[in-house]
Image: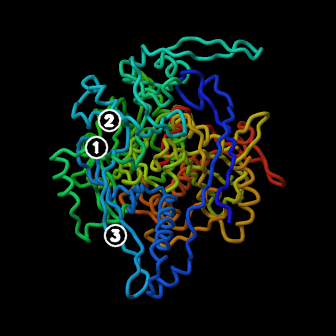
């Protein structure tokens, strides 16, 4: 057996411009070849028969070395799962195992493991272990907590430099991890560096001096709120610094805190580490509400009694339109504002209440809707941000579709409809959940979502898609089907979505508009979703795409793969069966089940777990909501005026009106 072996590795990597921030995406970066020589040395020959002997409880002189091999294999498996390894212990990135010790430090519970030969054979010894980690999240929040100050101006930056050195961060602008080597000598609006810029088309570069702040604001289009007067984080090398503003940097999870704990931190660790077996709740059964309160679902249900919503909108510049003759509007408004305040939503008094004229009650529905908007335009100084619509009888009345179309497609106004026959506080809470989600808020978060600990999804930019097709009612064979794609945005969240919808041939289940060439452009549903993800997720493209497709029978699986997947590449409370048709991410069964379970708890319209993942439910809602646009249309008129598209052997299909840009990325369907 050879005692030594040499390998030569040649690596290509992107280099940054001299001193420029931004790393791999910096102007002036180029490919650079680096060569490494790696020498592998023979250490020892371990007879694996010693393990078989240990299993039979027969110790030998090589048993301990053989068992160490098993320990190494077990540690390597934990490392592949993303665990933090500390000697013989391993720690998962699971918020259920974290205890806050104050000062930006957390205790992390994990396991100590080792194989042992016993009288009964080979045993795996597992014991509880604890280590200290730095609290992950925005760097500025860690520094404020670590130094116990309430404003960045009060931070001791020399102390901050020592606390941050060698920690690893992720940035909004680059999908990479960086090690902190220090801080800039000056604030971001004073720290200069040389930026290489192309001079014309001759391939030459000029060096220009620019501040770190101006680079990110002007060259990168970033909205920096407080970084101008703070030092930047240096993730380069001593002679080739690379600076990032602090507000763009977040500490990654599972980084050991190796400094001594204070007396209070030590006592807090002892107290908070005590854990009864019954307190070991599954992390998927823990939600986050406002003010950092925990909500513990029971049997898949939870409620917001004495709880606030986690991220609330501000309902201002809004009005009420009343098509109902049975509602005491003023009392409903007072009750709605009172319930909103209890959930943390700031809701102003409405600008006005618009009543439908009694003479129009029997008029054509289009005239009733137009008249209401004429009132709004004549009495309000500008377009309202939100309209509460009181329907005349039930939610699926004839006013509903034309009203939604007018608001969403023509004026770009978020609207919520309700049928005010039986109104109580619980009814109004359900209405407020929808309003908050539509106006950009979040009602609740999973803990693993808040701490970016969802397996595989939180580690890489991942877009989650839900797809569904809505068909006409029986007897409406000529009504177009509506295809909807709902996509997640603001990664790493999995609770916020937006929708794209297109019409297609009646009763066609396969989605024909995922990739839709129009001249030299792609007007398909997937492209819309990818662009929104890019703009809402810090200008990052998704590395991974996860698709949940509803309404496909087993006989249609091949069609989905051959038709829909090709287009994409081109741009539980009740048992539900999921089929994995294609997986390039490499989910394990456990990780995929955990993701599916998580997505059953993020449905913003309810306080219960749902039987189908939220993106699919949203796709169904979006298709149904926008389907009401066509409900009362003259199909022949629409086809001629909108310019429909066709599929092979089918009649022309009318296109839907495009949603107004003001509501296009909202959860209007919620």
| Residue 167, image x, y percentages | 40, 39
Q: Secondary structure at mark 3?
A: loop
The 10 Å Cα crowd at callout 3, few under 14, some 14 to 19, many 20 or more, is few
Q: Position of residue 460 (x, y in %)?
A: 54, 47
Q: Residues within 10 Å of mark 1 (few under 14, many from 20)?
A: few
Residue 175 location, quadrant: top right
Q: Which of the image's four quarters has the N terminus?
A: bottom right
Q: Closer to the camera: disc 3 or disc 1? A: 1
Mark 2 and mark 3: span between their CA atoms? 44 Å
Tag nearer the camera, 2 or 1: 1
Please give the residue where the numbered disc 1 appears in the rendered image: 259
Label 2 close to label 3 by CB (< 8 Å) = no
Question: Disc 2 to disc 1, how far (Cα)?
Answer: 9 Å
Q: Which residue is mark 3?
A: 299
Q: Which residue is mark 2?
A: 163
**Where 660 falls versus 544 (above or below)?**
above
Upstream in sequence: badge 2 or badge 3: 2
Q: Is residue 667 left or right of residue 97?
A: right
Locate residue 72 relative to residue 642 in the image: left or right: left
């Amino acid at each position: 057996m050879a005692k030594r072996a040499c390998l030569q590795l040649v690596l290509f990597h992107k280099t940054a411009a001299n001193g420029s921030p931004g790393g791999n995406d910096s102007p002036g970066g180029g490919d650079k070849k680096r060569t490494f020589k790696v020498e592998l040395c023979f250490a020892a020959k371990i007879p694996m028969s010693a393990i078989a002997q240990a299993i039979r409880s027969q110790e030998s002189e090589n048993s301990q070395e053989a068992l160490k091999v098993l320990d190494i294999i077990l540690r390597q498996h934990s490392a592949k799962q993303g665990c933090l390894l500390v000697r013989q212990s391993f720690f998962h990135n699971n918020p259920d195992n974290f205890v806050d010790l104050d000062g930006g430090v957390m205790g992390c519970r994990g396991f100590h493991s080792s194989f042992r030969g016993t009288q009964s054979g080979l045993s795996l010894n597992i014991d509880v272990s604890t280590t200290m980690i730095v609290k992950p999240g925005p760097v500025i929040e860690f520094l404020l907590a670590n130094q116990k100050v309430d404003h960045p101006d009060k931070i001791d930056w020399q102390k901050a430099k020592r606390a941050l050195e060698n920690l690893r961060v992720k940035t909004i602008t680059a999908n990479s991890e960086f090690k902190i080597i220090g801080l800039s000598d000056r604030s971001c609006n004073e720290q200069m560096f040389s930026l290489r810029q192309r001079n014309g088309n001759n391939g030459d570069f000029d060096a220009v001096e620019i501040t770190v702040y101006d680079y990110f604001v002007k060259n990168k289009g970033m909205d920096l709120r407080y970084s101008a007067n703070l030092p930047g984080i240096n993730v380069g090398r001593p002679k080739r610094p690379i600076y990032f503003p602090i507000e763009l940097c977040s500490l990654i999870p599972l980084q050991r805190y190796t400094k001594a704990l204070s007396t209070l931190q030590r006592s807090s660790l002892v107290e908070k580490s005590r854990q009864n077996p019954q307190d070991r709740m599954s992390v998927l059964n823990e939600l986050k509400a406002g003010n950092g309160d925990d909500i513990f679902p029971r049997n898949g249900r939870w409620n917001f009694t004495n709880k606030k919503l986690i991220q609330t909108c501000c309902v201002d510049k809004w009005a009420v339109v009343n098509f109902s003759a049975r509602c005491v509007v003023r009392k409903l408004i007072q009750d709605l504002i009172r319930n909103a305040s209890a959930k943390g939503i700031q809701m102003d008094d409405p600008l006005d209440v618009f009543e439908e004229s009694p003479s129009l009650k029997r008029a054509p529905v289009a005239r009733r809707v137009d008249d209401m908007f004429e009132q709004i335009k004549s009495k309000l100084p500008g377009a309202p941000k939100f309209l509460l619509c009181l329907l005349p009888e039930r939610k699926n009345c004839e006013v509903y579709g034309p009203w939604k179309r007018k608001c969403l497609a023509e004026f770009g106004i978020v609207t919520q409809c309700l049928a005010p026959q039986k109104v109580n506080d619980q009814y109004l809470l359900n209405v407020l959940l929808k309003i908050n989600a539509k106006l950009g808020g979040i009602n609740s978060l999973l803990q693993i979502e808040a701490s970016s600990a969802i397996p595989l999804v939180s580690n890489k930019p991942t877009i989650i898609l839900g797809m569904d097709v809505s068909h006409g009612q029986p007897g409406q064979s000529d009504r177009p089907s509506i295809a909807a794609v709902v996509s997640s945005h603001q990664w790493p969240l999995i609770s916020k979505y937006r929708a794209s919808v297109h019409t297609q041939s009646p009763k066609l289940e396969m989605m024909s508009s995922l990739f839709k060439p129009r001249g030299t452009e792609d007007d398909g549903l997937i492209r819309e979703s990818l662009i929104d993800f890019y703009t809402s997720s810090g200008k990052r493209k998704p590395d991974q795409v996860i698709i949940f497709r509803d309404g496909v029978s087993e006989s249609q699986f091949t069609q989905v793969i051959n038709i829909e997947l090709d287009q994409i590449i081109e741009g539980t409370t009740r048992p539900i069966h999921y089929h994995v048709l294609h997986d390039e991410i490499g989910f394990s069964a456990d990780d995929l089940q955990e993701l599916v379970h998580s997505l059953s708890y993020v449905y913003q319209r309810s306080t219960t777990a749902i039987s189908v993942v939220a993106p699919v439910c949203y796709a169904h809602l979006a298709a149904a909501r926008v389907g009401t646009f066509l409900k009362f249309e003259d199909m022949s008129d629409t086809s001629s005026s909108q310019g429909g598209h066709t599929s092979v052997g089918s009649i022309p299909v009318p296109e839907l009106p495009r949603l107004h840009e003001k509501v296009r990325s909202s959860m209007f369907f919620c």
